[in-house]
Amino acid sequence: MADALSIREAARSTGDSLAGSGGQNRAVPLAAGNEEHALTEADIPPADALPAQAPGEVIEPGRALALADFAPPAVGAGERLLRMAYRLGVPGSALSGRLGKAARPRLLATVQNPLPGSRMAGTALRAGHFLVHGIKAPIAQVDFAGAARMAPPLERVVHSFAWLSDVETCGPREQGAPVAERILTAWLGSNPKPPSRPGKGPAWMVGNAGTRVLNWLVHAPLILSGGDAALRARVFNHLSDTARWLDKNVGRADDLLGEVAGWSGIVAAGLLMPDGKPRRLFGEAGLIKALGEMVGDDGGVLSRSPLMQMEAIALLVRLRACYSAVRRDPPAALDAILSLLVPPLLALTHGDGSLGSWQGGWAVDASDVATLVTATGVRSRPLRDVRQWGYQRIVAGKTILQFDAAPPPLARHARSGCASTLAFELSQGPHRIVVNCGGAACAGGLIPVRLEQGLRATAAHSTLVLDDANSTAVVINGKLGSGVSEVEVDRRLIAGERQGGATRLEASHNGYASRHGLIHRRILILRDDGSELRGEDLLVPRSGKGKTGKVAFAIRFHLGVGIELGLSDDGQGAGLALPDGSYWQFRAGGDNQVSIEESLWADGQGRPQPIQQLVISGMVSRGGGSFAWLLKKMG
């Protein structure tokens, strides 16, 4: 399975970096007919069949996402003084009018959990083990102190207490509370008090700590309804200690989403714990500022990750439930940001409602996406042309095309950053035809951690790869290095006479320019009835005169689960039989040969599924070249 991802190839290239710019803009014309026949080279016109187009919009480095500007909530002079005093370190009890006397530890309200968890994962917890992306980890063997590091996905679930929603979902509280209390007791025994600063183990990353406070408050009945008064006292003390720790350390988060999680925990504690008004005012100002820095003008997060988009939405939905519990309206900016976050997420859904596999994410199940969106209360259509977030979407009948037409995220924003520029996914109805492998963010479940960097590589995406190298350098800890810094994008409609029109996307990136002196330009034309996708990949010299010699190239098309493949007799095409019985043909132009290799794909639960990929490969002159191809539904 690893071979065909060219996971071996991907792994070899994870440290490479590259770059380029400029070049011609040539188009692939629409088909002249709709006849049913085996596709031949004649079906794929040469690159110069249409004249060059004007250059499109340029997305420059650092400007791929413009920051949204949100001001702190408007408050009166007295509340501004409270907020300032609290920020300077005056305790909340001293500002509450109690003459410095702390209130009795208690919660001011019970929160109604707006987001159910996984019944299967909850059942597994009751049986004695965590279940994360298909891997079972016995509770008794988990090192809650963090000295023996766990796989990152399991680490996040354990220390953020995200598993509380799973326990709550799988049965009555009377059955779930003893399980939750048993795990909580073990965790408290390993983490008796906060450290002096973040980073002292995974439990004390700002993101995990903030999410943990929020989850403890939302799921308080599960962990505080038992008869153990000593445990309740420990939980209240730990909540207070962690909230104070977050007050001091929230600005030291690993990334902006971690900071947003930290601020969410602070606000939730301010809402639901006594003497909390100064903390709430302090937290609201910090939260809205952090959200404004994390979210672009069109609602996409700077990491360009649909998973982080979902995480941000889930944090705000749970926090809004805390406001509802105390009968207080959240700041208007929170609802505004939620309204911004939903449409870009929907832009990355396929026909079955599940997500495309981008920036380390997997094909998150439609039910999980729908549950989250419903909980927001936001009713919106997907954004079609998300220029700042960078994902283009074309809907043609039952066919959906997603296209990555922007530079990768900057290193400081990336968690599972991928070198995926100019990759695409294609689906028709519930069936995915062309996919990306995805799954880097869930490596450590059934997907081995050793494949994580390979799954972030350019070869793990449906696009062109030069010299087995990444278009942007893939480095450790989910970060990215140098490579693509500029992308040109052009989108337009093409009018048709007999067969209807089409949508044409053209984009180019400079990721291979510094090493090979070549710009990768990709043209995609999808007919309005969704039955035909024409593509052309061009390599254009950055300067007027190209370099001498040749370089290896491979254009990869990772295919959906359940597609049966057969090569044509001349080796220049392939037939694709989809699970619903429909039949598509793939054809490469020129004398380029097509091969079939193995690959893998992360499904809706982050589990690996074996798939296949079509590969057009060969050698190309450093003076440039063009490679046309066609994917057409027959019948």
Image (cartoon, helix red, strand yellow):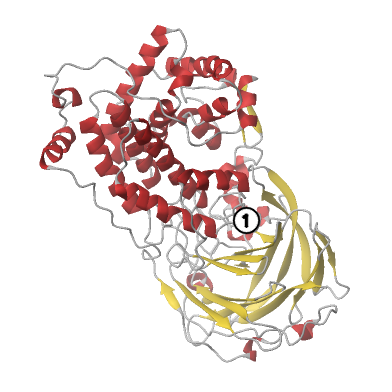
* Outermost residue toward the right in this view: 569
Identified at 82% across, 82% down, the residue is 35
In percent of width and height, residue 395 lies at 61, 68
Identified at 65% across, 76% down, the residue is 528
Using a 10 Å C-alpha cutoff, classify the residue at mark 1 as few (fewer than 14 neighbours), some (14 to 19) or many (20 or more).
Answer: many
User: Is residue 415 visible to us here?
Assistant: no
What residue is pinned by disc 1? 10
Which is nearer the eye, 568 or 330?
330
Task: Please state which amino acid type lies under the numbered disc 1.
Answer: Ala
Q: Which quadrant would the C terminus be assigned to in this image?
A: bottom right
Height in image: 430 above or below 512? above
Identified at 23% across, 37% down, the residue is 281
In percent of width and height, residue 64 lies at 40, 65
Count every numbered label the image shows and give the total: 1
* Residue 590 occupies quadrant: bottom right
Identified at 54% across, 30% down, the residue is 150
In percent of width and height, residue 541 lies at 53, 81
Tell me: 302 left or right of 347: left
User: Is residue 176 visible to us here?
Assistant: yes
Height in image: 330 above or below 399? above
Which is nearer the eye, 625 or 372?
372
* Outermost residue toward the front in this view: 327
Height in image: 547 above or below 215? below
Tell me: 391 left or right of 207: right
In percent of width and height, residue 482 lies at 44, 61
Tell me: 274 left or right of 615: left
Secondary element under disc 1, as helix, strand or loop, is helix
